[in-house]
Image (cartoon, rainbow, N blue to C red):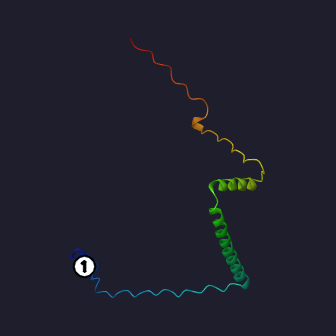
Amino acid sequence: MAPMFAWIARLFGAAPAARAPAPARRAAPAASPPPRPAAAVTAAAERARLLREAGEIHRAKRKILDALSDEDRAKLVSMAILAFLDQKDQPPPQPPPRPLPPHSAGPAPASPPPRPRRK
């Protein structure tokens, strides 16, 4: 034992090495989850199948989009926006202007009049 910690050993009356080591704790056996009903199992399997198919479709479509030129991609994006907004031939509306913050609303405060010069 290092002499630096000798006073701690004297304080507690026994050297830490003389004490019996603490028994190792055993982890409680993991309880298996309760069995799920058959409907939940089939729903989970169906969900996993749908996710797998969606991933395959996404990868296939991604390859097609990667082959487009920048101009074609821009046209496709604008067509998608128009279709999404259901405006057919009209561009998307401009957002309303933002209101000014309270500290900059209204005219600037008038500056004080100039001080008279001393002669």
In this view, 102 is above or below 37: above
In this picture, residue 18 sits left or right of residue 44: left
In this view, 39 is above or below 80: below
Quadrant hosting residue 52: bottom right
In this view, 12 is above or below 93: below
Question: Which residue is at the front of the view, 63 or 28?
Answer: 63
Helix, strand or loop at disc 1? Answer: helix
- The local crowd at label 1, few if under 14, some if 14 to 19, many if 20 or more residues have their Cα within 10 Å, is few
The residue beneath circle 1 is: 10
Residue 20 image position (x, y, % from top left): 33, 88
Question: Where is the N terminus found, in terms of image quarters?
Answer: bottom left
Q: Residue furthest left?
A: 3
At 25% from the left and 75% from the top, the residue drawn is: 5
At 35% from the left and 87% from the top, the residue drawn is: 21
Quadrant hosting residue 3: bottom left
In this view, 14 is above or below 66: below
Residue 23 image position (x, y, % from top left): 40, 88
Residue 17 image position (x, y, % from top left): 28, 85
In this picture, residue 1 sits left or right of residue 31: left
Question: Where is the C terminus found, in terms of image quarters?
Answer: top left
Residue 49 image position (x, y, % from top left): 69, 78
Quadrant hosting residue 45: bottom right
Q: How many marks on residues?
A: 1
Question: Which residue is at the front of the view, 34 or 2?
Answer: 34
Three-letter residue code for mark 1: Arg
